[in-house]
Image: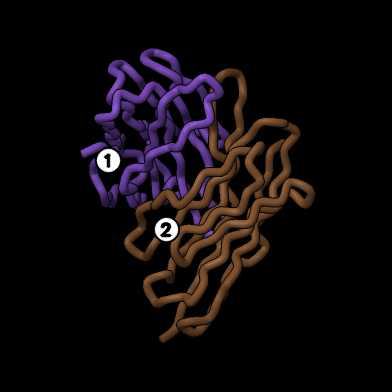
Amino acid sequence: EAQVTQNPRYLITVTGKKLTVTCSQNMNHEYMSWYRQDPGLGLRQIYYSMNVEVTDKGDVPEGYKVSRKEKRNFPLILESPSPNQTSLYFCASSRAGTAGYNEQFFGPGTRLTVL
Amino acid sequence: AQKVTQAQTEISVVEKEDVTLDCVYETRDTTYYLFWYKQPPSGELVFLIRRNSFDEQNEISGRYSWNFQKSTSSFNFTITASQVVDSAVYFCALSEHQGGSEKLVFGKGTKLTVNP
């Protein structure tokens, strides 16, 4: 089954304790992206990756890191989480088509609470 | 800059009513895609439809229909004979192509509640 998986699905942590949210896709997609969803703000892009070893900042990258060492995986790293990073996080992937306008497949979401 | 506006924050209807969710977008691109996603209470994002900027035909899928009008930069979504299972947050999104990358610019969503 084609899917994007994220782990963990729920996480409660404390300020300053480094954490990683994993994202994996089995569709051989080149493009992967992280979004955060906050009430009243919709979804905003954090980072994206066009392919292995190619990453770039989205709209709200502060406080986050990513890496793309393998095509299928795109982990989101919070080196020193703060309460304002409490949010619902989505990973997405898509093919990198000729025009780039391909449907993005979303993971199930990770609900993060930073105390 | 690309922008998507969903002016209706929350809508509440009674089952079997028809309801239209509005979406207005701004872009300077001539080629772009518009999307609708559904987010039920369980939280996942469910893809509903993609429409490219050159295809202004309305689309119908069961009780769902979409009205794309380039002249007014709108891509509205209508649910006919709404059901309780339609209760969700619905997001309209615009595909932005920048420097070889693609990103979705989302509206803030419309929360639809369908009451029995």
Q: Pinpoint residue B75: horizontal percent, then vertical percent.
A: 64, 53
- Which is nearer the eye, A17 or B25? B25
Give the residue type that dot 2 points to.
Gln
Do residues under tags 1 and 2 come within 8 Å of each other at their CB atoms?
no
**Identity, as a three-letter code, of the amino acid under mark 1:** Gln
Which residue is denoted by mark 1 in the rendering? A6
Q: Which mark is residue B14?
A: none
Give the drawing colour for chain B: brown
Which residue is located at x 46 percent, y 27 percent? A48
Q: Nearer the viewer, mark 1 or mark 2?
A: 2
In the rendered view, does A2 fall on the left or right side of B75?
A: left
Q: Quadrant of the N terminus of chain B?
A: top right
Task: Tell whether B71 sits left or right of B34.
Answer: right
Question: On the image, numbered disc 2 is attached to which residue?
Answer: B39
| Total numbered circles | 2
In terms of secondary structure, where does tag 1 sit? strand
Q: Are marks 1 and 2 on the same chain?
A: no
Res A115 seen here? no
Tell me how far mark 1 sits from mark 2, CA to CA. 17 Å
Left or right for A46, reference A6: right
Q: Point out the residue furthest to the left here.
A: A1
Q: Which one is nearer the viewer's eye here, B62 or A48?
A: B62
Chain A shade: purple
Q: Specify the quadrant of the image occupied by residue B62.
A: bottom left
- Residue B90 place in picture, x, y as percent: 50, 59
Residue A84 at x, y percent in the picture:
47, 48
Circle 1 chain? A
